[in-house]
Image (cartoon, rainbow, N blue to C red):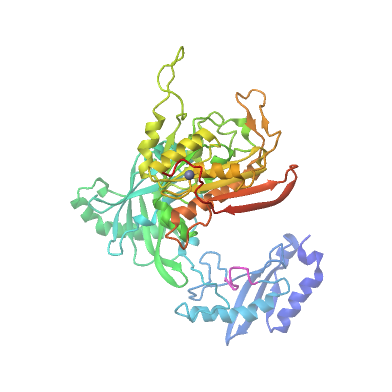
Amino acid sequence: MAWFEENPDLLQRELHALEAAGLSCTVDESARQDEHLLRLEVSGTIEGDTHTWMCAFPDAYPYFPPFVTGPDRGYRYHHHPDTGQYCLLRDGDGGWKPSMTLAQLLREQWPKFLAAQRASSSSEATPALEVQQAEPWTQYLQYEDSRQSVLWDATLEPPESESAGFIEGVPLGKYNGFKWLALVRSDLGGQHVAGRDLGEVAREIYAAGREETIPWVRLASAPGGTDPAAWWEEAARAWEVVRPAVMAGKKKSGGAVTQLLVTFPEEVGHRELGWGWVLVRAQRRGKPKTIPPTFQRVVRVGPDDLARRAPALAPIQDRRVLVAGLGGLGSQIVRLLAQTSPAELVLWDPDVVEADTAVRWAGALAMDGVPKAVALAHDVLDTQAHTRLELLGARVGHTRGSMGQQANSVGDQHGDLVRRLPDLDLVVDATANRSVQHYLSVQARDHGVAYMRADAQYGVWSGLVGLQRPGGEVCWMCWMHHVNDQTIPTLLSDPDGEIQPPGCGAPTYVGTAFDLAPIAAESVRMATSYLTETGEADRHPFDVMTLRLRDHDGRLTVPTWEGHELERHPACPNHG
Ligand SMILES: [Zn+2]
């Protein structure tokens, strides 16, 4: 039953309010009876002019406002070029309250809508109507398939003095080629001027196709309307103008073009113009036949673009981090860290994912039998395309060469680590293995690299995150002594927390991903703090943080973090 059938008083209230406001209205009776929809044609005089609005009420009325549409009388703002909808409320429907009526909406907001059209600058625009937001033209365009997009990178943005050129990129087979990753910008002569190489791991994980070049052109203004054919015509004409320069440069793509990346002025901030992008195609990828032109979205996913939502993390784009131990905790740390787009992640774990670890390892079923480092490389690159990856699978501490009867294929994992350490900024150790921790903490210290340890006790009753700074006073060995001394309080552990499930070659522990999550989050908070710190003022205050989730009897407690500022331990042999 429609809202106005269920609640006839509400409809009466609307109609009375319109009448009282001096607005006349006609109910669309066929919509009302056949479709149970309320549509009104409303007319009235506001600010000396007579207007007519077509108003449609949503099924969820009055929780959401009516849609108000009408003709374009040269409105520059708040009018959808295709649907004709007038945007009368701040933030779309954010200013709407169920106690309001259509009459009130028109009487109060229409004058503000008209005022916004007259305002020429941000400061003049009526704040009562407008949120301080841009109205990019690209949001009005109809795209052929929303899954298809050009993954754009702001670092490829050409200077305004240039009017055309080429973008080289690759279709990503992993996503059926729907995503096209822009990598390099070259000038009309085919000379590379900006860009990067995808890297071996990403090329493989993405199943990147052959490099492909798409020409781009700059238009002085957005072609009127949202018809892709009109855009294509104008963009192709602009391309014809620069084509002689391409021919002179003997670039192969001097011939006919079937797709063009188009940049044009559009709002990038509130009433602030910048350059928008869209791909217009007159041919399907890999098919010879031309088609009516279509739009394809261009999405901004370069490191600068991604840093806009967390500007303080921007320095991490230049940082390199190794994560050792990619189990329940390490995998979460990698995923969270990857979302900050570091320059490089070295992922190190000798094991494969096992489907029966689902309670701790997200995606365990899909990745069963795949090396953990490879599985996480997929997660990293499914999230962003900036981070360069190196995957290490050697088991640390094994002996190379033949021992007794059995030959082994252990690589020089110590050499691999020592080779990588000098250009790393941080080693995150989530192995929860005391020998590995000791080894990695010493190697990191010897090479002047920060070392971080993150682990949980059985049952995830408690956890620990610690940062050993390069050249710092306190080291991993100091922490161990402080734990023995109880300067760091005892980390509680489930006495029945070690188990060996059927078919499992080694004992494992009881614990869940959701209990590990706060430890992973704190590890990444501490890691990103260290990686972005500029001096004493914004330096993370603690060496070690401990988390308690349960009490001595295993009962849930309020999760409690404790920070420990530690001194060098007198018994530690590492400080001569
Ligand atoms: Zn020490």
Q: Work out which residue is located at the far bottom of the displayed protein and give it.
A: 48
Question: From the image, which quarter does the C terminus lie in?
Answer: top left
Q: Magenta stretch mostly in which secondary structure?
A: loop
Question: From the image, which quarter does the N terminus lie in?
Answer: bottom right
Q: Residue 453 placed where, x, y %?
A: 52, 43
Rendered position, 533 above or below 453: below
Asked whether residue 94 is drawn in magenta, I would say yes
Q: Work out which residue is located at the far left of the displayed protein and give it.
A: 248
Place residue 495 in its image quadrant. top right
Q: Residue 34 placed where, x, y %?
A: 73, 60
In the displayed structure image, the side of residue 33 where residue 535 appears, left or right: left
Q: Residue 338 placed where, x, y %?
A: 48, 47
In the displayed structure image, the side of residue 514 where residue 283 appears, left or right: left
In the displayed structure image, the side of residue 422 where residue 348 appears, left or right: right
Q: Which residue is nearer to you in this view: 81 or 492? A: 492
Count the labels in the image: 0
Q: Which residue is nearer to you in this view: 292 or 216? A: 216
Q: Which residue is nearer to you in this view: 353 or 51? A: 353
Q: Residue 161 placed where, x, y %?
A: 27, 64
Res 501 visible: yes
In the displayed structure image, the side of residue 388 where residue 510 appears, left or right: right
Residue at image location 54% in from the left, 48% down from the top: 523
Res 176 visible: no
Part of the protein shown in magenta: 86-95
Rendered position, 68 above or below 479: below
Residue at image location 63% in from the left, 42% down from the top: 513
Residue at image location 37% in from the left, 58% down from the top: 262
Asked whether residue 429 is drawn in magenta, I would say no
Q: Work out which residue is located at the far top of the displayed protein and give it.
A: 405
